[in-house]
Image (cartoon, rainbow, N blue to C red):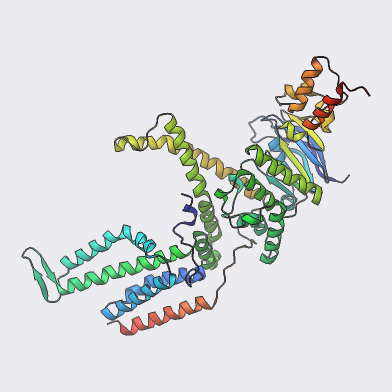
């Protein structure tokens, strides 16, 4: 698999006299995957996101995005065009006075000609299904709609990677579903690489691969089923296990044996009704 | 509250609504200057005709125009009275012993009040038929050449549009904080003035804190989307100078020439 981002032994702190937020973090992001980075508040996961598109520079180590090193001043703009971030607060990242203006913001920054811009805007609002709201003002949109506009603004620039930095944490369940469905569709249909930074393990369970962070270090990495086998470790660093998994663990303690880990409700139901089945 | 982002703007499809914001801005600016050319009845009638024509063509409900005038009406009346009583020119019209009214005073009073009235009507016509964001874009393009002498035109325009964008957000937030404080017993709308002013403080402090947080977040989001100042930046908003705008300028030029010819 093609490696898009390489993080090599990166350490980082915000100020010289403050403790390190990241210690020797190394990881790779591959083309077309959905990578979830999970960790409790203060584990350094959001800081990592800022390092991935050059908003912050590593104190030690290197961040390479498609071969561009974020330490090179010239590369920074190439990196920011390739890596888009959807931030947590839907209001505080809406720059334009209307949906069209906001989607255009990144394109305007790249100095694109107006005709091409209009084309790109129409194309990307259709992908997030916001085409009927082009002239709406931000305060008339719901949180989920604003985050979808933010996604449109990013994919209009045709990046290779979209980072969701706690992008669903301020949304209601319906908004959260909207945003995640939109991203999943983009990943499947356009082959977008997605990095989702979250403390919601339920969301992370749907990822292709998981990176677990605690106190500025990567403490585990792997496919969800493998990582969730270490349920105690995840609980220890302050994360809540997905509900189906909690039910399964509680049942196991009472002496029921399961053949596999259940990360979704559907899997749990299937496990439960086949549990006593003797065919 | 929901309408604050569009300011006083009244949507419409009139000739004036469809004019290029640059043309409207320039007209308003030039009008402010040529108003001072008028100095006799015929020139004031001419200016009045132009103003009335503009209002008529804009098809705005008169209610909106009156609303815009209301706060300034008192000033106009006061100006009129001051001139009537204090200018001592021409034949005496009225002598009340302690007060003398001269013809020159009445004339001067009418002229100055009309001048004020025209100025306000034309400028409010600009804000009533143009969205604030269009005005911002218009100012940005008009002042474009000033970039060469180091005037931060792009930054100013961006600041304006971000301010416009965040007004409703901050108002919503103010409302939320007020409700939270009221729930804990704060009173905003009763009590003596001093108490009411004091109660604003616990409203402003959290509002400022959150505004700074928002600013920081926004700056980060803008940078993440590749913002690096106005250089090499293109714009989605397109201003188009059309025949209408040229027509407006020809009318304005005619007005200017007639004023110059007819003034005494």
- Residue ranking furthest to the top: A254
Residue B228: tell me if it is visible. no
Looking at this view, is A240 or A163 the one in front? A240
- Is A174 placed left or right of B244 in the picture? right
Q: In terms of depth relative to the viewer, which is nearer, B36 or B178?
A: B178
Q: Is residue B217 visible?
A: yes
Q: Is residue B184 left or right of residue B111?
A: right
Query: Picture coordinates of residue B64 (x, y %)?
Result: 39, 61
Point out residue B95 in the picture as x, y percentages from the top left corner.
7, 69
Q: Work out which residue is located at the far right of the displayed protein and give it.
A: A279
| A95 is higher (above) or lower (below) than B181 | below
Q: Quadrant of residue B213?
A: top right
* Quadrant occupied by the C terminus of chain B: bottom left
Residue at horizontal 14 percent and vertical 72 percent from the top:
B102
Q: Which residue is found at the position 29% from the left and 36% from the top?
A: B192
Q: Position of residue A197 (x, y in %)?
A: 72, 37
**Where residue A88 sits: x, y (%)?**
64, 40
Quadrant housing residue A183 = top right
Residue A232 is left or right of residue B195, and the answer is right
B8 is higher (above) or lower (below) than B188: below
Front one among A187 and B194: A187
Check the image and report above or below for B244 versus A147: below
Query: Residue at the location (81% across, 37% down)?
Result: A27
């Amino acid at each position: 698999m093609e490696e898009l981002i390489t993080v090599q032994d990166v350490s980082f702190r915000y100020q010289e006299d403050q403790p390190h937020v990241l210690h020797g973090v190394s990881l790779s992001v591959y083309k077309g995957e959905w990578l979830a980075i999970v960790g409790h508040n203060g584990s350094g996961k959001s800081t990592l996101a800022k390092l991935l598109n050059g908003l912050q520079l590593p104190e030690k180590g290197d961040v390479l995005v498609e071969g561009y090193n974020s330490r090179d001043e010239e590369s920074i703009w190439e990196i920011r065009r390739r890596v888009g971030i959807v931030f947590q607060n839907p209001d505080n990242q809406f720059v334009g006075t209307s949906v069209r203006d906001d989607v255009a913001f990144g394109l305007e920054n790249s100095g694109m000609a107006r005709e091409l811009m209009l084309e790109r805007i129409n194309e990307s609002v259709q992908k997030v299904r916001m085409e009927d709201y082009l002239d709406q003002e931000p305060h008339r949109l719901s949180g989920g709609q604003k985050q979808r506009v933010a996604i449109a603004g990013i994919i209009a620039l045709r990046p290779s990677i979209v980072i969701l930095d706690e992008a669903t944490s301020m949304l209601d369940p319906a908004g959260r579903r909207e945003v995640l469905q939109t991203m999943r569709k983009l990943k499947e249909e356009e082959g977008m690489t997605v990095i989702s930074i979250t403390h919601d393990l339920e969301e992370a369970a749907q990822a292709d691969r998981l990176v677990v962070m605690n106190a500025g270090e990567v403490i585990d990495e792997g496919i969800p089923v493998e990582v969730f086998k270490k349920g105690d470790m995840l609980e220890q660093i302050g994360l809540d296990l997905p509900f189906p998994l909690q039910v399964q663990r509680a049942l196991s303690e009472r002496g029921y044996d399961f053949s596999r880990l259940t990360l979704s409700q559907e899997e749990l139901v299937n496990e439960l009704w086949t549990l006593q089945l003797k065919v | 509250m929901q309408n604050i982002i569009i300011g006083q703007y009244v949507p419409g499809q009139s000739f004036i609504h469809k004019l290029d914001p640059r043309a409207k801005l320039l007209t308003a600016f030039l009008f402010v200057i040529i108003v001072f050319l008028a100095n006799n009845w015929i020139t004031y009638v001419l200016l009045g005709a132009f103003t009335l024509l503009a209002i008529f063509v804009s098809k705005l409900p008169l209610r909106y125009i009156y609303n815009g005038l209301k706060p300034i009406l008192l000033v106009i009346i006061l100006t009129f009275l001051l001139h009537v009583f204090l200018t001592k020119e021409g034949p005496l019209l009225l002598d009340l012993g302690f007060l003398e009214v001269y013809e020159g005073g009445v004339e001067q009073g009418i002229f100055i009040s009309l001048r004020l009235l025209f100025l306000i009507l034309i400028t409010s016509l600009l804000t009533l038929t143009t969205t604030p964001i269009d005005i911002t874009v218009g100012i940005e393009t008009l002042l474009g050449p000033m970039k060469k002498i180091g005037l931060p035109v792009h930054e100013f325009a961006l600041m304006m549009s971000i301010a416009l964008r965040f007004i409703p957000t901050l108002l919503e937030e103010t409302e939320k904080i007020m409700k939270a404080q009221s729930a804990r017993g704060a009173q905003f709308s009763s009590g003596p003035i001093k108490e009411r002013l004091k109660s604003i403080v616990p409203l402003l402090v959290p509002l400022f804190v959150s505004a700074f947080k928002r600013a920081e977040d926004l700056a980060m989001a803008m940078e993440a989307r590749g913002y690096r100042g106005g250089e090499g930046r293109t714009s989605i908003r397109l201003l188009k100078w059309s025949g209408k705008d040229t027509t407006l300028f020809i009318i304005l030029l005619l007005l200017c020439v007639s004023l110059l010819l007819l003034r005494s």
